[in-house]
Image (tube, grey):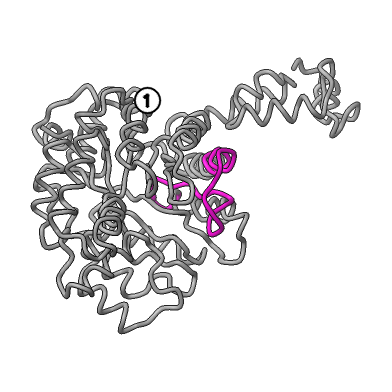
């Protein structure tokens, strides 16, 4: 029985109880949200060391970190170091997007060493296998695709990005309207290339019931991938993107009816003034399904700083309804991120998520900031560092710029506003 089936039957599971405690919500709230599909809890029955996370309405905005080997950098050990960096920085989920080296070993090691939900994009491994065995990624078969989904589900993967909404109808709209950046989703491009080569409908759409059966057996949450997400501002909110979203909304309904948890993936590059409308469209068309967004990135001209452009967009997106932010690192659009860039990407996305949680009134968000405000008034540096979203960096900067004996900091020194006003008002700190 999946978490959704249990909730639909009115049965509160231990996983739901854990999420309720972590979120500061009542068990009834979590049960109702899971039953309605507005909350998902990715928790594969084979992920043994999992501490579950809830994603969705009224919960803390979650952050995902992408890691994985590539053909240029196939070393598994380095990816495991990046996994640990993501976890240390506070990632709520991790996706293994490996395309190089021993992909099966990488995935199994990530699952074995990861206490938070693990996601994958199965079409990546399908394409890698087809390229190695047949010399062309389009030579994978529909059975190959479903076989990889089953293999990854057996290994304990909690959520999978599946590009079910990449259909002939959406491809037709792409061709008809035209784009500046065409398709930037790797999985989407694999799917489109396969469909055009074979002149057949997307197997994950045509065989959706088969996909649901696998997902239900292992309680894998389907993350319906946005194959037509805009890769530049000029392509945002166009017909192919919205057509895919309409299809995904219909597929969410079918997943819920089958007892399978589902969430929706959202756009990448979106002008700031279009973000709120995109969130409202998704929630309306997909009947409140949790929304998982990459960024959104609000300008195309900041390579090297796209963790910042994504945080700007992510804050507004989450405030307007997005539930799950996929981190963007400083290396986005430039290359594979290293360990430090992974850490920086997670922290930056967490800042965006927390800023949105403050605006949404998520339990615990305001209390955290209030505790920091009091620690600053008291010039309690130890407590400030402990409360920091990135204590490591806060501690390093404090130590580098101040002596251990200093009560104030080198910014103001003896002219510290906090100290002066407390003394003037006769208030104890």
Q: Is residue 164 above or below residue 102?
A: below
Residue 224 showing in the rendered view: no
Instruction: Judge whether residue 403 is colored magenta.
Output: no
Say if 350 sits above or below 229 in the image: above
Of the pair 295 and 112, the residue shown nearer to us: 112
The residue identified by callout 1 is: 22
Mark 1, other Cα within 10 Å: few <14 / some 14–19 / many ≥20: some
Magenta-drawn segment: 319-346
> Residue 333, how many percent across, how many down?
53, 59
Image coordinates for residue 59, horizontal then vertical, percent: 36, 37
Location of residue 156 with respect to 428 vertically, above or below:
below
Residue 374 in the image: x percent, y percent? 65, 24
Q: Quadrant of residue 157?
A: top left
- Asked whether the viewer can see residue 22, the reply is yes
- Image quadrant assignment for residue 4: top left
The N terminus sits in image quarter: top left
| Residue at figure coordinates x 26%, y 23% from the top left | 48
């Amino acid at each position: 029985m999946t978490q959704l089936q249990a909730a639909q039957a009115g049965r509160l599971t231990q996983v739901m109880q854990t999420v309720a405690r972590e979120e500061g919500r009542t068990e009834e709230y979590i049960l109702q949200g899971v039953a309605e599909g507005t909350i998902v809890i990715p928790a594969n029955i084979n992920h043994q060391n999992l501490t579950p996370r809830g994603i969705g309405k009224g919960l803390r905005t979650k952050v995902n970190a992408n890691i994985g080997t590539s053909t240029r950098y196939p070393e598994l050990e380095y990816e495991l170091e990046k996994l640990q960096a993501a976890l240390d920085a506070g990632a709520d989920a991790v996706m293994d997007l490996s395309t190089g080296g021993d992909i099966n070993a990488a995935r199994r090691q990530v699952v074995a060493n990861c206490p938070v939900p693990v996601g994958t994009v199965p079409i990546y491994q399908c394409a890698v296998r087809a390229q190695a065995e047949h010399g062309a990624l389009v030579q994978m078969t529909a059975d190959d695709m479903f076989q990889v989904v089953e293999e990854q589900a057996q290994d304990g993967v909690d959520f999978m990005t599946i590009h079910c909404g990449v259909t002939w109808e959406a491809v037709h709209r792409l061709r008809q309207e035209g784009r500046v950046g065409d398709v930037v989703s790797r999985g989407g491009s694999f799917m489109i290339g396969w469909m055009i080569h074979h002149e057949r409908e997307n197997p994950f759409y045509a065989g959706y019931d088969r996909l649901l059966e696998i997902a239900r057996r292992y309680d894998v949450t389907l993350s319906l991938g946005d194959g037509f997400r805009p890769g530049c501002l000029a392509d945002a909110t166009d017909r192919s993107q919205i057509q895919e979203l309409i299809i995904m909304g219909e597929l969410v309904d079918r997943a819920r009816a089958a007892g399978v948890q589902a969430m929706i993936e959202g756009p990448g590059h979106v002008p700031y003034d279009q973000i709120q409308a995109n969130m409202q469209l998704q929630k309306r068309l997909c009947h409140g399904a949790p929304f998982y967004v990459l960024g959104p990135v609000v300008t195309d001209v900041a390579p090297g700083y796209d963790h910042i452009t994504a945080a700007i967009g992510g804050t507004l997106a989450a405030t307007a309804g997005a539930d799950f932010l996929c981190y963007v690192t400083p290396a986005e659009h430039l290359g594979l991120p290293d360990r430090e860039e992974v850490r920086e990407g997670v922290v930056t996305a967490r800042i965006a998520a927390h800023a949105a949680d403050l605006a949404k009134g998520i339990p615990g968000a305001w209390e955290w900031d209030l505790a920091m405000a009091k620690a600053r008034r008291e010039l309690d540096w130890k407590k400030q560092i402990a409360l920091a979203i990135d204590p490591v960096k806060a501690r390093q900067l404090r130590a580098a710029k101040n002596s251990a004996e200093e009560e104030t900091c080198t910014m103001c020194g003896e002219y510290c506003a906090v100290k002066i006003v407390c003394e003037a008002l006769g208030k104890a700190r």
